[in-house]
Image (cartoon, grey):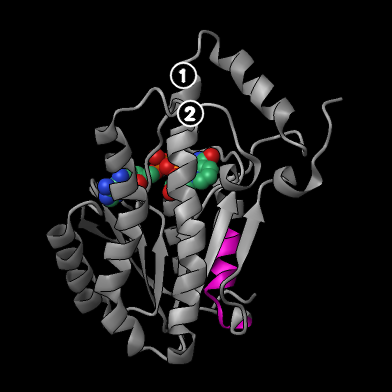
Amino acid sequence: MTAAELDGLTAVVTGGASGIGLATATLLAERGARVAVLDLDPSAVPEPLLGFTADVSDDASVSGAVEAAAEALGGIDILVNNAGIGAIGTVADNPDEQWLRVLDVNLVGVVRTTRAALPHLRRSTRASVVNLGSIVVTTGLPQRALYAASKGAVHSLTLSMAADHVREGIRVNCVSPGTVDTPWVGRLLDAADDPAAERAALNARQPHGRLVTPEEVAAAIAYLVSPAAGSTTGMTLQVDGGMANLRLRPQ
Ligand code: NAD
């Protein structure tokens, strides 16, 4: 992919102030796109990224921010639905309020942002959407019932969105990361008794012996939104060091 592959395109990245979203927004800008980040707190987003305050669990907030971003960018060709939150526990552990909160951000947040961006995407000749899924949908993981259910819905939503909009020329794909070294995972490690030992154990559990980097996930997203992927839609691309497919036994 050349540096200018995304020249002239405009992109909106939700949750783009941290981790995978920030790496993605940065890479899309390096490849030539004009990029707006929508986040609860975009105050530290570096130039040339444009920051807009938005809460994807609030319809008025999202639609206002999408309109402001579209106006500043001069349209929207690319939407990356990346904002998400985690949840720990089995079905026995979380009350209804917590289920509804996580679904509201991780699932309905994707719906709200896409709905707001659709009129702009329809005006683009190179429109595409990437949703952030998760490896837990494929592998299952203890203590992640609520998070996995929310991301499983995003995986299946991706397919239906792709079918609904393929005739309009809007591609919709999903990237499914393994364990990525972001502030999110850093917070989980910091909460352990021995964060260094926990990090070493986490690395050892990955088939390729280390965490996925945010830049590796960003590169997959940048490919999927590029003209080079012009015939790819309804696809889930795993960026997980082989976790989902290789089914390695512990050594
Ligand atoms: P992160 O916590 O580092 O960043 C998430 C960003 O989303 C933050 O800037 C936060 O402010 C923003 N955000 C959260 N709630 C929001 C809301 N309601 N409205 C707007 N913005 C909101 O997380 P990350 O690790 O970079 O994860 C990004 C995405 O990737 C999430 O959807 C996550 O589920 C997914 N993912 C992460 C991993 C991982 O191991 N880190 C693995 C699989 C999938």
Where does the magenta region start and end?
219-228
**Most extreme residue toward the front, as rendered?**
92
Q: Can residue 31 be seen in this view?
A: no
User: Please, what is the three-letter code of the amino acid marked with disc 1?
Assistant: Asp
Q: State whether residue 196 is above or below residue 229.
A: above
Q: State whether residue 188 is above or below residue 124.
A: above
Quarter holding residue 202: top right
Disc 1 designates what residue? 190
Q: How far apart are marks 1 and 2 (CA)?
A: 6 Å
Disc 1 + disc 2, Cβ < 8 Å: yes
Residue at 35% x, 60% y is 110
Q: What element carries label 1?
A: helix
Q: Is residue 55 visible?
A: yes
Quarter holding residue 80: bottom left
Residue at 38% x, 22% y is 93
Q: Which of 174 and 31 is in front in this view?
A: 174
Residue at 44% x, 16% y is 191
Q: Is residue 4 left or right of residue 65?
A: right
Residue 234 within the magenta-colored segment of the rendering: no
Q: In this view, does 242 lie to the left or right of 167?
A: right
Residue at 29% x, 82% y is 120
Disc 2 designates what residue? 186
Mark 2 is surrounded, within 10 Å at the Cα level, by few (under 14), some (14 to 19) or many (20 or more) other residues, namely few
Q: In which quarter of the image is the C terminus?
A: top right
User: Please, what is the three-letter code of the amino acid marked with disc 2?
Assistant: Gly
Q: Where is residue 175 in the image (x, y as percent from the top left)?
A: 56, 58
